């Protein structure tokens, strides 16, 4: 009788769910993250950020080193080139001065004064390029007038001629030298300034040229009124 009752207890009851299967033996019920699987990364870049920054820093460092090395090499080569060639400043000297009289009267000076200079480039391996040179004329320390030489080039170990024309000389200038002119001799000072460039192959060096020709004697003919260079000036100061 009791045996039949035990069999009845072991039979499943219709209408009630059977017992749930046991959980996974490796699943820890005390740990709950809300995700049974690893959460996928939201970073779409397959390479770490620090790797990119390191590569960028390395590239910039190498580029900076290359630029510094190039500048050092260029400076050394330029220095050696100038040591070998040893640039020399050009030489200037007055060669011609013409101050013609006016057509109406020999006692009035023409407004056009002309000065000619011989320029020598003593460098045997270096050419010289002249920018526009400013030519100023002085009577003592009194400024009279000015003009310009156009840009030009001069080959190594050669001579050239520069011609300066002072046009439309003011009346005050004529009066300023009139007393000296009556005595037959006028001394003028000529100043030239401008940038020049020494060229040797690919190398170039700039220099601010200053030329000063002091006491350029101009002798006037008492009959014709023509003023010409009296000579005697060996050369001009060049710096």
Image (cartoon, helix red, strand yellow):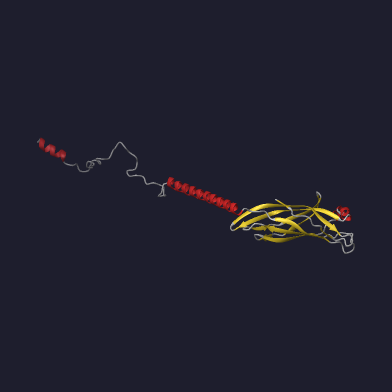
- Above or below for 30 versus 44: above
Quarter of the rendering occupied by the N terminus: top left
Left or right, 5 with reference to 156? left
Give the image quarter of residue 148: bottom right
Where residue 152 sits in the image (x, y, percent)?
A: 69, 60
Where residue 80 sits in the image (x, y, percent)?
A: 57, 52
Where residue 220 sits in the image (x, y, percent)?
A: 86, 58
Left or right, 9 with reference to 150? left
The residue depicted at 67 percent of the width and 61 percent of the height is 158
Q: Residue furthest bottom?
A: 103
In front of the other: 12 or 113: 113
- Above or below for 228 versus 45: below
Where residue 184 sits in the image (x, y, percent)?
A: 87, 56
Give the image quarter of residue 129: bottom right
The residue depicted at 46 percent of the width and 47 percent of the height is 58
> Number of marks in the image?
0
The residue depicted at 54 percent of the width and 49 percent of the height is 72
């Amino acid at each position: 009788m009791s045996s039949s009752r035990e069999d009845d207890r072991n039979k499943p009851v219709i209408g009630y769910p059977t017992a749930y299967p046991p959980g996974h033996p490796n699943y820890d019920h005390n740990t709950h993250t809300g995700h049974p699987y690893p959460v996928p990364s939201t970073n779409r870049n397959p390479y770490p950020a620090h790797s990119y920054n390191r590569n960028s820093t390395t590239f910039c460092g190498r580029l900076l080193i290359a630029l510094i090395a190039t500048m050092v090499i260029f400076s050394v080569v330029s220095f050696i080139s100038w040591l070998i060639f040893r640039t020399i400043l050009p030489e200037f000297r007055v060669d011609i001065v013409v101050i013609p009289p006016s057509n109406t009267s020999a006692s009035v000076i023409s407004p056009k004064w002309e000065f000619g200079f011989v320029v020598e480039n003593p460098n045997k391996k270096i050419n010289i390029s002249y920018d526009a040179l400013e030519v100023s004329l002085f009577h003592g320390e009194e400024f009279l007038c000015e003009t310009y030489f156009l840009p030009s080039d001069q080959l190594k170990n050669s001579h050239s001629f520069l011609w300066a024309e002072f046009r439309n000389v003011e009346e005050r200038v004529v009066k300023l030298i009139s007393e000296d002119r009556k005595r037959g001799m006028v001394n003028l000072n000529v100043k030239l300034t401008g940038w020049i460039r020494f060229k040797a192959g690919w190398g170039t060096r700039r220099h601010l040229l200053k030329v000063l020709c002091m006491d350029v004697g101009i002798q006037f003919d008492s009959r014709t009124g023509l003023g010409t260079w009296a000579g005697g000036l060996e050369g001009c100061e060049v710096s």
